[in-house]
Image (cartoon, rainbow, N blue to C red):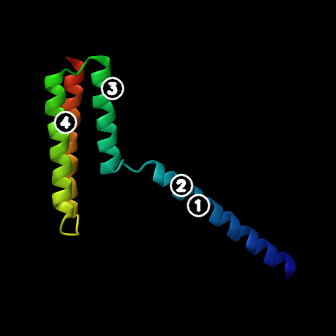
Amino acid sequence: MNKSLRLIFASLFAILGLSVVSFAQEGENKPPSINERQQNQRERIKDGVQDGDIKKKELARLAKEQAGIRQQERRFKSDGEFTKVERAKVQRNLNQSSRHIRRASRK
């Protein structure tokens, strides 16, 4: 009986270990959060300015667009609930902003 108990516990630990590994891998495929995307876009704008790819006028336009997205997100969260529809709108605006940054950096 002692051997069978050991075998059962060893099997349980092996299964739990595999479960933890699979959960860890799922987290790696998770899309970036809104805050991570905003930080990434700030870095891209900063790099574009440092490289000379983004000029003053474009920087002002991109900064205004980023501020608008942050304001929209704050407005959506102000009632204490951030719905899927509101999140999708912010993500859509971040997608558009990302395209604008890419275009400004390529001029």
Residue at 16% across, 59% down: 75
Kindly report the distance in space between the C-alpha atoms of the residues bearing marks 3 and 1.
38 Å
- Snapshot quadrant of residue 97: top left
User: Which numbered disc covers residue 24?
Assistant: 2
Q: Amino acid at mark 1?
A: Val
Q: Check the image and name the residue furthest to the bottom.
A: 1
Q: Relative to 53, is 3 on the left or the right? A: right
User: Which numbered disc covers residue 63?
Assistant: 4
Residue at 64% across, 65% down: 15
Q: Determine which residue is flagged by label 3.
A: 47
Nearer the observer, 53 or 24: 53
* Mark before the other along the chain sequence, 4 or 3: 3
Report crowding for label 1: few under 14, some 14 to 19, many 20 or more residues within 10 A (C-alpha).
few
Residue 81: x and y, percent?
22, 68
SS assignment at label 1:
helix
Q: Amino acid at mark 3?
A: Asp
Report crowding for label 3: few under 14, some 14 to 19, many 20 or more residues within 10 A (C-alpha).
some
Report crowding for label 2: few under 14, some 14 to 19, many 20 or more residues within 10 A (C-alpha).
few
Mark 4 touching mark 1, by CB under 8 A? no
Q: Amino acid at mark 2?
A: Ala
Residue at 47% across, 53% down: 27
In this orientation, does residue 7 appear?
yes
SS assignment at label 3:
helix
Kindly report the distance in space between the C-alpha atoms of the residues bearing marks 2 and 4.
36 Å
Q: Determine which residue is flagged by label 1.
A: 20
Kindly report the distance in space between the C-alpha atoms of the residues bearing marks 3 and 2.
32 Å
Mark 4 touching mark 3, by CB under 8 A? no
